Amino acid sequence: MSFFIQGPMGLRAIVGIGLALGVVSQGFAQSEPREWYEQQLQAMEQRYVSRIAALESRLQGVEGELQSERADSQDRALAGQIDRLTERSGIRAASQSSRFDNAFNPAISVLGDFVLGWSDRRDSFNSLNQFVLREVELGFSGRVDPILAYYVYIHFDEEEVELEEAFGVLDQGLPDTFSLKFGRFNSDFGKLSPIHDAELPMVDKPGVLQEYLGGSLRGTGLELHHWFGLGEANLLRWSVGLLNSPDGDSHPIVPVDLGGHHHEEGFDFDGIGKRGVDDFALTARVTALFELGEESTLQVGASALWAPHIREFEEEESGEILAFDRHQRTFGLDATFKWRDETTGQAFTLGAEAFFQRAEFEAEEAKKKKETAISGEVFEEDAFGFYVYGEYAFDSRWSVGASVDWFERATDASADWWDAGVFVTHWIDEFNRLRLELRWYEDDLADDEFGAAMIQWTTVLGSHGHALSW
């Protein structure tokens, strides 16, 4: 019979048995005084303890080497995984692949926004009291390589196809936390302007955004971003942009015939005149995010648009093309408070934006707006407006909210517009959302007032997201 004992405890057991046997054999071999046996036992114990300590030290060294080898193996495996993700294996000139794979395929999403709008407004036959497929948005996003990401969003409705956004983001390779956006995109102006219509907290963009910015302030150009920490829990971000010309884009369910610079539709025209440096537009934004506690944040921001020369074209019934020039400066201030309890899903959001706009436009355009212009005159109009909204979530599925919108008309500040509404939102799951909204509108310029009810169903297929979330 044999026993196999491992580890320091096993060594101590062997030592103990050896000591006992040694003592017994010594005791039978000779009769020495008790002190002699004790000295022999102590000497043997010291020798064995020393040998055990040496063995334990050696064992610790072996364990350390094994741990180091495991860490090196894990590092090599991780490095290999990163290499496999970032390598351009099989990619030849002009990104032509020598093998069939999906390593560089984008994330693809399809978003559908379907609305039933009902209103007692006059002259609403073509827009209200009917089902509306407001948009089907096809999205592509992914990485070109470790330093460059790309995003493409294409808008479809029942009548047209529109390239909403197509841009790249150089988010690695620049100093510090700088990033560069280039292409056609929604400009970084305010809180709700950059957001696509289907992702708003209410059905339509606030009227003040449609009046002063055309809905989403969009253009083709460059935008530089930078963010950094303010202390341990706060952040600050700023951006500057250079656009060919500011365009507006909005797809409201309730058409309110507002001003702003919208993308031209209905005719194909190359334009009159020669572009100059003043045809470019500049945008800027600075925003700070403060952590008020474990469950709440406050974001404040300021935005600016300077467009020294905006040329717009309009086709008369006779077929004649008219050109109108405007000079626009728009400033905005925004604040958003958010509170959320992660355990219950309860949340509260309170947001507001205020805008001041100064616009100069030619007499011919003024004639169409005011019918009082004299040829050769240039009109200057200052206008102010704001919106406020709040939303409370009972849990992750149900929420209620309300919003108010008031502003002076961009081309006639003596006339104002306001609307107010309430809305209930239900998330069936993370891919399907239902919303009911009731709203009241009053327009001084058209001497009109009316109500509207909207039922919205939004659904998303695939991985859907956008580059900038704050």
Image: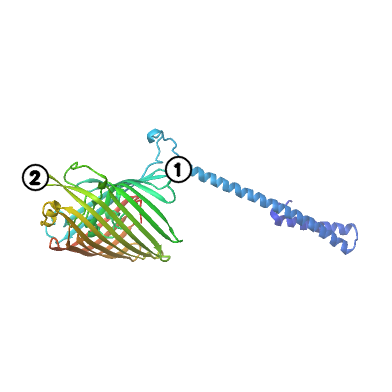
> Mark 2 or mark 1, which is nearer the start of the sequence?
1
Which residue lies under the disc numbered 1? 85
Quarter location, residue 230: bottom left
Residue occupying the point 60% across, 50% down: 67
**The residue under label 2 is which amino acid type?**
Ser
Give SS at disc 2: loop
The residue closer to the viewer here, 321 or 457, is 321
Instruction: Report if residue 326 is visible in the image.
Output: yes
Q: Which residue is mark 2?
A: 318
Residue 395 image offset from top left, x and y in percent? 35, 64
Q: Quarter-wise, where is residue 97 in the image?
A: top left
Q: Quadrant of the C terminus?
A: bottom left
- Check disc 1 and give the amino acid type: Leu
Residues tagged 1 and 2 counted as in contact (Cβ below 8 A): no
Q: Residue at x 13, y 51 (%)?
A: 376
Residue 339 shown left or right of residue 448 in the figure = right
**Element type at marker 1?**
helix
